[in-house]
């Protein structure tokens, strides 16, 4: 039966109510905890208009990474091997990532890279960036293997940024001090390689999405500019590590103690 046209030219339409969800015998909807895969699918759909299983920010960050992997794999037409490590991963996190074809590392790995690698470190601690850069600061060729998708390195030297290194000084006993505050993340250690890298790396900031600001604010894709690095003198670089040296693994273990997806 065809609806009649109104005088103003519009056709009246009768809307059918959506079907109600099934109810149990008592007339109440039965509650069921969603699986991690269902939670992530919901986050994925939301993005299209500190463990992974517990944190919505971590889920947003994973969905962004998964979207990037899908785009890159579509371009190069092959699977991209991806490894995950986080000391706070729950068994459910490990099971889900493994089911998606990713490798989940059980222990920290050496930070010195053997081939060009994209490191996805959203909101990682400054100490982790410092250890990563220090471990690969032996030559321009070695540093070119480091591609970081994480906190903007240049903001650490910006006095208006809450995590800035500006104003940080060394005390007489070598302990860090920023103003009159002690015991912050920099106490007893420096971040000289983060500051140096900010001048050598090309920094492409990601736009801050209003709906997911806490998950993605201040992130950037960052890689070395070869011309800037290759013009440096030999004294600019650290010596090559000796065979069997474990210092970088220990540095990694210390850094990841502070690392947890928010």
Image: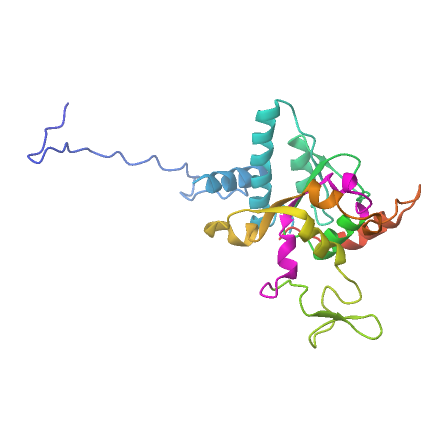
Residue at x 75% of width, y 42% of height: 230
| 151 shown above or below 171 | above
Residue at x 52% of width, y 37% of height: 41
| 128 shown above or below 85 | below
Residue at x 89% of width, y 45% of height: 241
Residue at x 65% of width, y 63% of height: 164
Which residues are the magenta region?
135-161
Q: For this rendering, which residue is in front, 128 or 226?
A: 226
Q: Is residue 60 left or right of residue 240?
A: left
Q: From the top left corner, tell me how far across and down residue 101 is, in percent.
A: 67, 30
Q: How many numbered badges does the structure rendering display?
A: 0
State which quadrant residue 3 falls in: top left
Q: Residue furthest bottom?
A: 180
Q: Residue furthest left?
A: 7
State which quadrant residue 120 falls in: top right
| 20 shown above or below 124 | above
The quadrant the N terminus occupies is top left
Is 136 magenta? The answer is yes
* Colouring: rainbow
Q: From the top left corner, tell me how far across and down residue 203 is, in percent.
A: 61, 47
Is 227 magenta? The answer is no
Q: From the top left corner, tell me how far across and down residue 175 is, in percent.
A: 80, 70
Q: From the top left corner, tell me how far across and down residue 157 is, in percent.
A: 65, 61
Q: Is residue 7 visible?
A: yes
Q: Is residue 222 left or right of residue 31?
A: right
Q: Is residue 75 left or right of residue 179?
A: left
Q: Is residue 35 visible?
A: no
Q: For this rendering, which residue is in front, 166 or 92?
A: 166
């Amino acid at each position: 039966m065809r609806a009649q046209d109104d005088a103003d030219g519009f056709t009246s339409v009768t809307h059918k109510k959506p079907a109600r969800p099934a109810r149990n015998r008592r007339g109440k909807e039965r509650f069921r905890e969603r699986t991690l895969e269902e939670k992530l699918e919901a986050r994925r759909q939301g993005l299209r208009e500190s463990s992974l299983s517990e944190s919505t920010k971590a889920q947003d960050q994973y969905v962004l990474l998964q979207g990037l992997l899908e785009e890159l794999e579509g371009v190069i037409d092959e699977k991209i091997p991806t490894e995950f490590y986080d000391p706070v991963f729950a068994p459910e996190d490990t099971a889900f990532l493994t089911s998606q074809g990713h490798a989940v590392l059980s222990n920290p790995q050496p930070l010195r890279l053997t081939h060009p690698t994209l490191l996805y470190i959203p909101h990682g601690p400054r100490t982790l960036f410092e250890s990563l850069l220090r471990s690969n600061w032996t030559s321009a060729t070695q540093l070119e293997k480091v591609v970081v998708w994480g906190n903007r390195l240049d903001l650490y030297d910006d006095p208006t940024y809450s995590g800035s290194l500006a104003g940080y000084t060394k005390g007489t006993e070598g302990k860090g001090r920023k103003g009159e505050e002690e015991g912050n993340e920099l106490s007893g250690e420096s971040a000289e390689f983060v500051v140096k890298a900010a001048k050598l790396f090309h920094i492409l900031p990601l736009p801050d999405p209003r709906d997911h600001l806490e998950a993605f604010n201040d992130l950037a894709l960052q890689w070395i500019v070869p011309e800037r690095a290759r013009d440096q003198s030999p004294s600019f670089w650290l010596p090559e590590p000796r065979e069997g040296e474990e210092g970088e693994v220990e540095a990694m273990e210390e850094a990841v103690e502070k690392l947890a997806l928010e």
